[in-house]
Image (tube, rainbow, N blue to C red):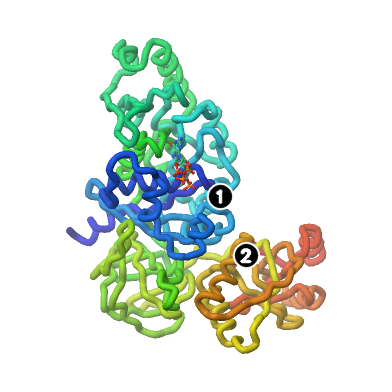
């Protein structure tokens, strides 16, 4: 297969949702269709979970929260699909935000009974800023939930989406009969007794046909016809370009646990979802078809084996062909490195690969040379943009708790920060270290990992900060004055940039008023 065909057949995406909406279940079903996992019959999904997701960290098992972001690749209808799993738990939101920098599209899962939840709003917001194309899967139709039209309204309002239903449910809960697939003009019937089986699929070009009554009964047929008429009247027709530019969001209904509506979603997805897109760097735009390899590190993960401190750096390939054993430039180090065992991820298996193409995610064995955002190229000096750190909102002072282990403590802390577990700030006034995170659980993760991986221990002290923001100004005198007047709240991030730790929204507002020429940024890229 030619280089261009390899790029065109790739679909790299993430599934985002509020915890419990059904992301893991949907992922498993997609993997089943791709033959990446085999599960006979109605095996309980949490049993599959162990295999389907890469539970790298012990803490994840203890808490049952997906700490890690894993990659699952499989083939389906000549397409190479890469699913980038994203932790739904809000404490790991930053991990998820970062993963979303490496996808070309996303599927948003919504629970029919719960509607749009807060975590979904945040994650969709991140995708929106990047114009990432998104499809919506409304899940758990086998349960009683909100009316379909009300849900579509809610999606439009809360997620600021322009929806375009490509399937429509026939009843829900105990009355759930199936969906009408508007994209393929098919009636897909739900059989509550044949769990995990595909429902009967009937070609149904004309919804006015009296045949409809035969399948779903008079009342449901009448209602469906009215609803489909309303759908065509109210919602825009599907338009590929609008979807691919992030301006239109196709919606599907189904029940992931019953494997219902998942195939329709996947079949449509492989047809319409974009292949790898161009990437931006500080220097220029990179097209995937360019022959020279480029890529960036979007995630760094501690290795599965707690006896080894080595890590896996996740590389997203942006252009050209990545080849095993070839020398590539690590732009930040200005050094060439060779990777003798790059791995790809196929569901629960990792395997060494000889080559990989734009859109693919490759795992690189790392002993500490990478930080998030690093670029690899064939020699060109490039810095990829759009991989920012996000302003943390929870803070603690951190100190070494074991004077004999100060080296391990510093090294551990530095490496954990490079992985993006949290952000470390150093107060200019007294050199104290402050850890900032998006979620509270990260503090426990850091403590646990320092202990288990670095034999170091840390002590936290409460730090009464409300928000960290990066500051900049073209008015050097005002910036200097800001630094002087707010000196006890000023710190530097790991790149030495100025960060202001505000203690309250009121204080932030006051600073904005007092220093109108200073700009406040809530991501590290500005
Ligand atoms: P998440 O990754 O988004 O957090 O959600 P996950 O897939 O783990 O699903 C959360 C719960 O919702 C699971 O139940 C799962 O079985 C259930 N679920 C997923 N899809 C559907 C659906 O279409 N209909 C119904 N009724 N339930 C669904 P659980 O009890 O937490 O776990 P389990 O023991 O069933 O695995």
Residue at the image position 56 percent from the left and 70 percent from the top: 448
The one of 465 and 205 positioned closer to us in this rendering: 465
The one of 183 and 264 positioned closer to us in this rendering: 264
* Res 187 → quadrant: top left
The one of 235 and 182 positioned closer to us in this rendering: 182
- Apparent side of residue 353 relative to residue 179 in the rendered image (left or right): left
Ligand 1 within 8 angstroms of badge 2 C-beta: no
Query: Is the C terminus in the top left, top right, bottom left or bottom right quadrant?
Result: bottom right
* Res 365 → quadrant: bottom left
Residue 264: image x %, image y %? 33, 36
Instruction: Tell me if residue 525 can be seen.
Output: no
Q: Which mark is residue 125?
A: 1
Q: For the view shown, which residue lies furthest in the left direction?
A: 1
Instruction: Tell me if residue 145 can be seen.
Output: yes
Residue at the image position 30 percent from the left and 58 percent from the top: 346
Label 2 SS? strand
Picture mark count: 2
* Residue on which disc 2 sits: 437
Of the image marks 1 and 2, the number of the one nearer the N terminus: 1
Residue at the image position 57 percent from the left and 48 percent from the top: 119
- Apparent side of residue 426 relative to residue 236 in the rendered image (left or right): right
Q: Mark 1: few, some, or many residues within 10 Å (few <14, many ≥20)?
A: some
Measure how far apart labels 1 and 2 are at the Cα level. Answer: 19 Å
Residue at the image position 35 percent from the left and 49 percent from the top: 274
Residue 20: image x %, image y %? 51, 44
Label 1 SS? helix
Query: Is the N terminus in the top left, top right, bottom left or bottom right quadrant?
Result: bottom left
* Res 40 → quadrant: top left
Residue 155: image x %, image y %? 54, 37
The reply to whether the C-beta atoms of the residues labelled 1 and 2 are less than 8 Å apart is no
Q: Which mark is residue 269?
A: none
């Amino acid at each position: 297969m030619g280089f261009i065909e390899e790029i065109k057949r790739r679909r790299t995406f993430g599934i985002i949702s509020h915890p419990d909406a059904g992301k893991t279940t949907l992922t498993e079903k997609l993997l089943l269709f791709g033959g990446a996992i085999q599960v006979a019959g109605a095996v309980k999904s949490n049993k599959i979970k162990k295999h389907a997701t890469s539970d790298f960290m012990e803490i994840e098992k203890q808490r049952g929260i997906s700490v890690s972001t894993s990659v699952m690749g499989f083939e389906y209808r000549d397409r190479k699909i890469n699913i980038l799993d994203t932790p739904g738990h809000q404490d790991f939101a930053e991990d998820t935000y970062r993963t979303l920098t490496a996808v070309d599209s996303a599927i948003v899962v919504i629970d029919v009974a719960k509607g749009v939840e807060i975590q979904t709003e945040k994650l969709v917001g991140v995708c929106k800023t990047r114009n990432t194309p998104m499809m919506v899967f409304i899940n758990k139709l086998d349960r009683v939930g909100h009316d379909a039209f009300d849900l579509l309204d809610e999606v439009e309002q809360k997620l600021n989406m322009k929806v375009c239903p490509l399937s429509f449910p026939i009843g829900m809960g105990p009355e759930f009969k199936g969906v009408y697939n508007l994209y393929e003009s098919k009636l897909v019937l739900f059989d509550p007794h044949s769990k995990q089986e595909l429902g009967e699929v009937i070609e149904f070009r004309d919804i006015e046909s009296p045949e409809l009554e035969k399948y779903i009964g008079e009342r449901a047929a009448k209602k469906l016809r009215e609803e489909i008429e309303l759908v065509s009247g109210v919602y825009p027709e599907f338009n590929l370009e609008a979807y691919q530019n992030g301006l239109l969001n196709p919606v599907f209904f189904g029940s992931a646990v019953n494997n219902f509506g998942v195939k329709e979603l996947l079949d449509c997805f492989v047809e319409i979802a974009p292949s790898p897109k161009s990437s931006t760097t500080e220097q220029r735009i990179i097209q995937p078809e360019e022959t020279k390899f480029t890529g960036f590190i979007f995630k760094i993960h501690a290795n599965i084996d707690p006896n080894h401190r080595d890590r896996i750096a996740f590389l997203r390939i942006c252009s050209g062909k990545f080849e095993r054993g070839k020398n590539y430039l690590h732009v930040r180090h200005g050094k060439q490195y060779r990777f003798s065992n790059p791995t790809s991820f196929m569901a629960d298996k990792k395997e060494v690969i000889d080559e990989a193409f734009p859109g693919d995610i490759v795992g690189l064995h790392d002993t500490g040379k990478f930080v998030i955002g690093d670029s690899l190229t064939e020699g060109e000096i490039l810095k990829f943009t759009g991989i920012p750190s996000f302003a943390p909102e929870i803070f603690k002072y951190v100190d070494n708790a074991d004077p004999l282990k100060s080296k391990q403590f510093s090294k551990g802390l530095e490496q954990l920060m490079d992985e993006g577990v949290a952000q470390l700030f150093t107060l200019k006034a007294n050199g104290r270290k402050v850890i900032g995170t998006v979620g509270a659980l990260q503090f426990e993760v850091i403590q646990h990992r320092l202990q288990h991986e670095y034999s170091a221990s840390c002590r936290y002290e409460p730090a009464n900060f409300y928000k960290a923001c990066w500051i900049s100004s073209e008015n050097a005198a005002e910036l200097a004055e800001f630094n002087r007047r707010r000196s006890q709240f000023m710190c530097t991030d790991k790149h030495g940039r100025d960060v202001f730790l505000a203690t309250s929204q009121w204080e932030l507002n006051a600073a904005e008023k007092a220093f109108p020429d200073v700009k406040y940024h809530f991501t590290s890229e500005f």
